[in-house]
Image (cartoon, rainbow, N blue to C red):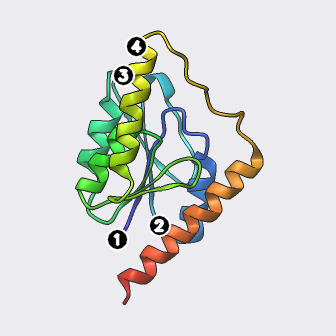
Amino acid sequence: MMRIIVDADGCPVVSEVIESGQKLSLPVLLICDTAHVMEREGAETLTVLKGADAVDFVLVNQMNKGDVVVTQDYGLAAMVLARGGYVMDQNGHEYTNDNILGMLERRHVAKKIRQAGGRMKGPKKRSKEANAHFQQNFEHLLLRLQNEEYI
């Protein structure tokens, strides 16, 4: 059975993910580190020790082929795709094998600019509309995957 796994450290759409999971009878696993401990009704929580990429490595080891992961981390998204999972970011954008390399390249270029003293524009303030947009796209992805399972 497909599961939903959330890189829950700082994820702004945890409530929407849980609601969507309940609507479609899919289990939800939240993975966070000790700096972001959370318990939410309707989801199981796995808390890991704080450390660089600790949540990422636990998440990749917990996931199975066909699971759906919510993360904004491009590196984690690439690992999930390599293991046969599906990935969406908090803005409702699906990471795929067709777009992940370009995203990783843009991240690399941005890091070089920051290391050279340059500044990058940060994200806009989160809105209710952004959360609704995420949830609509997320449920569309889940339904598409459920339908593919039964074809």
Q: Mark 1: which amino acid? A: Met
Closer to the chain start, of discs 2 and 4, is: 2
Compared across the picture, whether 75 is left or right of 124 comes to: left
Vertical comparison of 1 with 100: above or below: below
Residue assigned mark 3 = 50
Vertical comparison of 126 with 13: above or below: above
Residue assigned mark 2 = 26
Closer to the chain start, of discs 4 and 1, is: 1
Q: In percent of the image, x 26 and y 63: which residue is there?
A: 65
Q: What's the CA distance linking mark 1 and mark 2?
A: 8 Å
Q: What's the CA distance linking mark 2 and mark 4?
A: 42 Å
Closer to the chain start, of discs 1 and 3, is: 1
| Front in this rendered view, residue 62 or 123 | 123
In the rendered image, residue 63, in percent from the top left (x then y), is placed at 29, 53
Compared across the picture, whether 73 is left or right of 51 comes to: right
Vertical comparison of 98 with 6: above or below: below
Residue assigned mark 1 = 1
Residue assigned mark 4 = 115
Q: Quadrant of the N terminus?
A: bottom left
Q: Mark 2: which amino acid? A: Leu
Secondary element type, mark 2: loop
User: Pointer 2: residues within 10 angstroms few (<14), some, or many (20+)?
Assistant: some
